[in-house]
Amino acid sequence: MDSTESAPQLSPAEGATSRPIVTDERPLPKLTPSEFRQYNRMAEHMDVFHNRFRATWKILYSACETQKRPKNMSIRQFLNMGQQFCHHLTMHHTIEEQHIFPILAKKMPAFKKELELLSQHKQIHVGLDKLESLRPAARGARKAARTQQRSALVAVAMLHELLLSLSGHPSALFDAGTTSQHVTSATNELLSPPEAELLSSIGHLSRLHRKVRDHAARIAASHPSTVCRAVATSITAHHLDLFQRKILEVESRILKQDTSTVGAYNIVPLAGIVSEFSEWIRLMEWLWDLSNFILPPEVPPKGERQSSNVSSGAQLIDRLRTEAQTGYPDIEDAARYLGNVAEASWLRQLSTWLLYGRLPSFGASDFFVWRDSEEFDELLFRTNHSLLPKFVTRHTAASILFIGKSLNQIRSFQSTRRAADAASSVSELDLLPRHVQLLSQVRAPIAAAALSESVATIRLSLSRNLLQHLLPREKIVETLTVLHQFFLVGRGEFAVALIAEADGRLSSRHRGPSSTRPGQTVKGLLLKEAEIGQTLTRSLAILSTLSDIDEHADDILDVAGQVLHLIPHDSQGHRPGTPGRAKDAELILPQMVNLSFNELLLSVPCSLTMDTPSPLDLFITKGDMEVYTSINAYLLALRRAHLHLAQLWRHSSIRRDHPCPPGYQYSNSAHGRMILARRRQRTTARARFMRKVWATCAAAVFYLAESEAYFQGEVVQESFDHFLSWVNGAPGSSTDGADLRQQHDPEALALAHRYFLTSISYSLLLTDMAFPKLLRTFCTHVDELVAYITRLTNIQQNLDLEEDEGVEDFALNFKKEEKEVALELDRARKRLDSDLKGLVERLRELDGERIGVSVPGLGNGVSMDEVGYEPPRIGGIDRLLMKLDWSDEDKEEPENLL
């Protein structure tokens, strides 16, 4: 075997047989086989050891030459093999030199000292000494390798723990407390301060990931809003999934030893790992804030539906639209993505209502259309504007509500629809594909113009194909005629009959002359609900006896008898002056002063109402009926005050009385002439006292007559005629004589009807804050004046009987009562006169305030083009003032009315 610089050379004498070097070439005697075995016995025995040394040397030499450890052998085992080889070979040579070679040297001189074989042993041991000297260095290298290996294992374990913690698994590497952002003290012993600071950001990101994941799972499982659930699910399925893919990407680059992540000597820089995830910290913090906005962490479990801090779908959509305007690209992209998810979920809710007229089966409490829970027997729906996203206008929301209500009406009137199939074979199911196509054009992010256009097209399609058969023009005109004749007092005899019947009811329950007190109405004359209803019934019955031959008028009266009701109201819990607060009022109705006139007709607050069954409620809502009720009470109060003052002129004994001479037996006697003079003197004194009262009454009657003429003739009648002509449409006909007038869309009709009510309320001065209060006080003072005049008349009649006929009532002092009532009557006259001047003065102020001011619109961004109706230009208040402008030259000085 050849020797190298690092390995000693083995002698061929260590082979199978040891051949001595013979200097004398004499032939040896031939040995027998038995002698050969005897002589070769030691060589065979030593050959076993030599073969083992050769195999070990081959392993060592090959490992040094290839610089690679033998298979399945650790570095420690390899070094031990070399050490054992040196030790065993040294011991083997020592045994040979001391025990074997001396015996062989007796016959073979080659084994003697200082000869070839011993020289080979010395050369081999020189190599062994060199090999022995390399062992400490190998031990040090082995220890360094072991330390490096241990450090590498720690680094690998650290990377594995970091990636696991970032993936959302609990890790002992970071503190369990959410307030700490640093690594644990046990791990910190192995890290330098910069490394610990770098790991703190990774720990913060890991905790954020776990909190966002757990909170999003809670939102997706228990939040009452489907929009919020969809956003929470998208956070988990999209953003957290992208984060998980980022972790897998970094791990893959580490395993593949990508140079972008792994540096020299397979070192993975911790700063590189931190920089890979630094961009996710801001996004994860934003996702955590958004999750807290959707559902605050302090909300207890199973308390999401009761808590007011829980976000609605509309609030979340508005928040995401605002967050999309930020300057951070990653947050902007996330907000846009989640906003599209939220708006798509909201569109699914909207499609259920727009296409089928049904509320969402899940998450209906988060939808802006609610069913009225107070009346389950009717299909009444209302809009909760707090649940409406900001990109949806009020007009679009009203159209959406109208479409759903219309679909409910169509389903409720299946028989009516089948009856209309003769004229139109189109059903709501036939229109469904077209409506689906229109709604599918609205995509997230939703544009307000696109949504409004699609909703308007669906509304027109539904109205022109179905609703014109469900709600024909004749039914609309009939309903409007009932409202005009009875609520707007277009039929004057109805108001007269109702007021007369109400006065008769009160007179029949009159309890005594002392029931009326100054400054009060007849509160003690309480009527039951049945009696109030009978008042309207008897009034309509009287009208039926007074009706002429006009068949159409009789039909309207029959319809009114079926749908009109006079019902009492709770004056404390009812607000007839603010019908805009009605639950199903889609748009802002005229805001009237919080003052009611419904207490003047009877002893209890009562209002005239009308049933609006389906499908009439498509364009007449409860809010509209409250406006009609307020206008009716307002006009009836004027008519009632006028009638009560006018009836005073029918009592000739009060207004004109000239006593005639007594009977023939006293006519020519002095006593008779004295009686006649006393009576005429008493009558003259009473007439002189009543002159101012009659002047005030005449002025009040004049004011009421002119006001009624203006309100009833110029405001109500002209406005109604103009609106009815708009409802009927422009006349036109085809070549075959068929009527070509296009019926208005029910929603457009509803908007125009509300505009009509707004115009009337504005022209009737009901929207002013001061005038209705003055008029309400005026009507109260008229009742007081009439009551005092009636009471004074009764007292004077009793005094005449006492003085002339001697009929005395010792329980009453009529002279004292006459003085008291006369004093109160004069005060009531002065109050009424002051009210008249205050009303006229307010009319002058309104005339100046309304110069150049048009009728207010509907609000909510509804334009005149969308309504399609423009109210008529009615004459201003100056036309009424020209008739009421009496001279103020004889103004009386203000007196103490008390």
Image: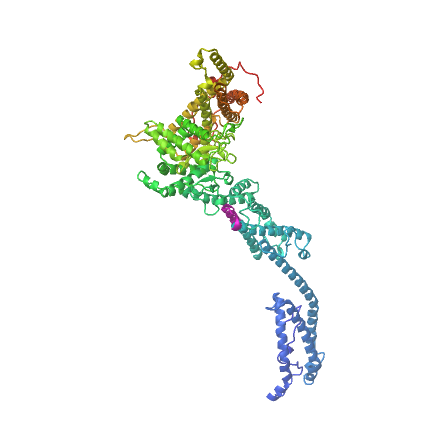
Q: Is residue 644 visible?
A: yes
- Near-viewer residue (206 or 143): 206
Instruction: Describe residue 845's horizontal placement relative to residue 542 as left or right.
Output: right
- Near-viewer residue (844 or 443): 844
Image coordinates of residue 265 in percent, x first then y, are 62, 57
Q: Is residue 189 above or below residue 711?
A: below
What type of secondary structure mainly makes up the magenta span?
helix
Residue 235 part of the magenta segment:
yes
Instruction: Describe residue 120's horizontal placement relative to residue 515 as left or right.
Output: right
Of the 4 image quadrants, the one containing the N terminus is: bottom right
The region drawn magenta spans 221-236
Q: Can residue 860 be seen in this view?
A: no
Q: Which residue lies furthest to the left in this view?
A: 736
Which coloring applies here? Answer: rainbow
Q: Is residue 330 above or below residue 80?
A: above
Of the 4 image quadrants, the one containing the C terminus is: top right
Instruction: Describe residue 395's horizontal placement relative to residue 474 as left or right.
Output: right
Image coordinates of residue 468 in percent, x first then y, are 36, 36
Residue 487 part of the magenta segment:
no
Instruction: Describe residue 384's horizontal placement relative to residue 132 as left or right.
Output: left
Image coordinates of residue 684 in percent, x first then y, are 49, 14
- Near-viewer residue (863 or 188): 863
Image coordinates of residue 844 in percent, x first then y, are 51, 20
Q: Is residue 303 above or below residue 141?
A: above
The total number of labels drawn is 0
